[in-house]
Amino acid sequence: MSADPLTDFSRLCVHTITTKGWELEEAVDHYAEVGISGITVWRQWLDRRNASQAGDRIRAAGLEVVSLCRGGFYPAVEEKARKESILDNQRAIEDAATLGAPLVVLVCGAVPGQSLEESRKQITDGIAATLPLAESVGIKLAIEPLHPMYADDRSAINSLASANDICDQLNHPLVGIAFDVYHLWWDPELEEQTRRTAEANRFFAYHVCDWMTPTHDLLNDRGLMGEGCIDLRGIRAMVEQNGFHGMIEVEVFSNRWWNKPTAEFLKAIQHAYLHHT
Amino acid sequence: MSADPLTDFSRLCVHTITTKGWELEEAVDHYAEVGISGITVWRQWLDRRNASQAGDRIRAAGLEVVSLCRGGFYPAVEEKARKESILDNQRAIEDAATLGAPLVVLVCGAVPGQSLEESRKQITDGIAATLPLAESVGIKLAIEPLHPMYADDRSAINSLASANDICDQLNHPLVGIAFDVYHLWWDPELEEQTRRTAEANRFFAYHVCDWMTPTHDLLNDRGLMGEGCIDLRGIRAMVEQNGFHGMIEVEVFSNRWWNKPTAEFLKAIQHAYLHHT
């Protein structure tokens, strides 16, 4: 099964980290100029900025604020650090509300040497602790399952099944999942777990990029769509068949692309979006 | 749960690739000298050697030949290439029989851009095609599920569940699984799938090393046991509780260690085996 090509940019969202050569204002102006529809703002782009004004600026340019990236990193050996993490996640939720982003993406965290079971428990407790605030401001929280190669220090949630299990435990309409093809494409249970995600109304976000062969760096060697081996149209067909028709968010960490002029990269993103996504 | 420390080297096996600075004869002499009990021979160590004499040499030194590493790489787009792979796997099985190794480890293969479902089908067909020969010489075949970061071009079998599924399909007493902590430690289903493996009498081999934080290279930055975050004693307790008491095979690909004198590395392996495995 393969999705029909995308023919316009009405569902194209770009993460500010993807075009990290640009400050927020530059990104907004460039995205708007070429007809991109959405932006996901990474938190460091709000440093030394008024989030409310940033949101107004984005909307005035005709862009939709898709999400704020990223909260999470709940697990820690010391209780003090876990409490600080909850405070930081509360700030992220408040910032999302001020910015006008409906969603905070969660990279949930892990601690090398601490059992993944314990980290998952701390993640569940950490999210639960922020739910009253999320409810009061109406902000959704999206657990992003991360590729198993990040299980040491980035996330103890490494499959769609595991993310769904945590969502089941929390059992709250504001808690769902951010589905990133880079982290999930290899999973034999992808179809079954995507159905489970959709049926529980927790398919909150969809991130795309590609997997390079070879991959030279575990963090910053992602491919642009079409450069790698992920069956992007097959996966999109699957998620759309399960009812997802939201924004398609381009999140590419790539030293190779970051070394080129950012405007050239943005042009390549638009081409890859139409021809390979 | 944590296993008791290992107190001698009666279950210690080393892969020739781990001490890759040494030719086969040097490895055998060094292993025997320090009391290591087993050796897993990688195929390139049989190049330009008579496998029968190599086996005799190993046994004469008092070492057990634990396995031949590695067959596999069945999937290919072209049928011709798939047929060549089957021929190569038949050579591996014959070499194992000649060497006196009871087992061939299979790194099953994958093709970037070919669906993982298709690759898994080609793997199943490829193994099936070699079973008559394996039967005739009594050689076991161990599917080694590989970490999902190798799903692009090394193996389409990326979890213990997936390896068990293939074994179920082949349903043959000579087809089982090589369990490598590096590939599997992150899996939330590890306990359940280990039980499944053991109950089906297909827990054929156990490989150890460690996961480094950070990992600088996807292939050759494995840690020696104790250097990383894998709960080695917890996993060993689990596999032993499920009835595995066979060789513990040290398989470390590490540019960092390979840059040191090999004898120094072997000493570190023995220390890590007693103190961290």
Image (cartoon, coloured by chain):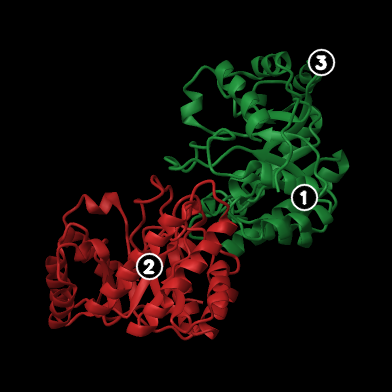
Chain colours: A red, B green
Residue drawn at the location 47% of the way across and 78% of the way down: A239
User: Which image quadrant for residue A19?
Assistant: bottom left
Residue drawn at the location 47% of the way across and 43% of the way down: B218
Q: Are marks 1 and 2 in contact (CB under 8 Å)?
A: no
Q: Are marks 3 and 2 on the same chain?
A: no
Count residues near mark 1 (Cα–Cα under 10 Å), then give few for <14, some for 14-19, many for 20+: many
Using the image, determine if residue A151 lies above or below residue B48: below
Cα–Cα gap, marks 1 and 3: 29 Å
Cα–Cα gap, marks 1 and 2: 36 Å
The residue at which mark 2 appears reads as: A208
B31 sits left or right of A141 in the view = right
- Residue B16 point in image, percent of width and height: 64, 27
The numbered dot on residue B176 is 1
- Amino acid under disc 1: Gly
Cα–Cα gap, marks 3 and 2: 57 Å
- Amino acid under disc 2: Val
Q: Going from the N terminus, do you reach mark 1 or mark 3 first?
A: 3
Viewer-closest of A229 and B79: A229
Residue drawn at the location 54% of the way across and 46% of the way down: A113
